[in-house]
Amino acid sequence: MIVKSLGLFSLAKIMGITYAFFGFIVGLFFSFFALMGAILGATLEDSPEPLIGMIFGVGSVILFPILYGLLGFIGGIITAGIYNLVAKWVGGLEIELQEKSIAQ
């Protein structure tokens, strides 16, 4: 089988959701380190800066998936467009499939 073209929005949706998932994971790590920094900062000095760090840390769990998802969606559109253009010149991506029998 040969994949001759990719649907722009089909690939964009898949990449957008996948990147949003990765953004959530990155946001969790970023949030963890921001919260640890805020706690460390709060123990060392009396200032409002640790509170700002905590808010930014928690906000990263919301902001990163949105940004990553949006960039993944845009990247999916660009990738599908480039693939479709190149596939017209050199042919599509060849994929070998095997049907799974029920007896296996």
Image (cartoon, rainbow, N blue to C red):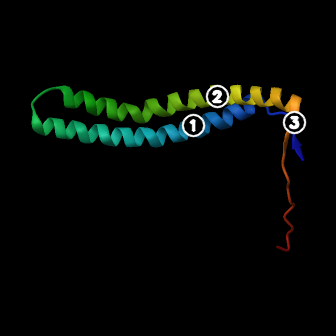
1 and 2 marks in contact (CB < 8 Å): yes
User: Which quadrant of the figure has residue 89?
Assistant: top right
Measuring 76% from the left and 26% from the top, which residue is drawn there?
81
Indicate the secondary structure of the residue bearing disc 2: helix
Where residue 35 appears, as percent x and y from the top left, is: 27, 39
Dot 1 surroundings within 10 Å: few (below 14), some, or many (20 or more)? many
Q: CA distance from mark 3 to mark 1?
A: 25 Å
Instruction: Judge from the rendering whether residue 51 lies leftward or rightward of residue 69; answer left or right.
Output: left
Dot 3 surroundings within 10 Å: few (below 14), some, or many (20 or more)? some
Furthest residue toward front:
90
Furthest residue toward bottom:
103
Where residue 39 appears, as percent x and y from the top left, is: 20, 40
Measuring 22% from the left and 36% from the top, which residue is drawn there?
38
Q: Disc 3 or 1, which lies upstream in sequence?
A: 3
Amino acid type indicated by mark 3:
Lys
Q: Disc 1 or 2, which lies upstream in sequence?
A: 1
Which residue matches tag 1?
19
Q: Nearer the viewer, mark 1 or mark 2?
A: 2
Amino acid type indicated by mark 2:
Gly
Instruction: Judge from the rendering whether residue 76 lies leftward or rightward of residue 54; answer left or right.
Output: right
Which residue matches tag 3?
4
Out of 51 and 7, give the one closest to the viewer: 7
Amino acid type indicated by mark 1:
Tyr
User: Which quadrant of the figure has residue 55?
Assistant: top left
User: Which quadrant of the figure has residue 27?
Assistant: top left
Where residue 65 appears, as percent x and y from the top left, is: 50, 34
Which residue matches tag 2?
75
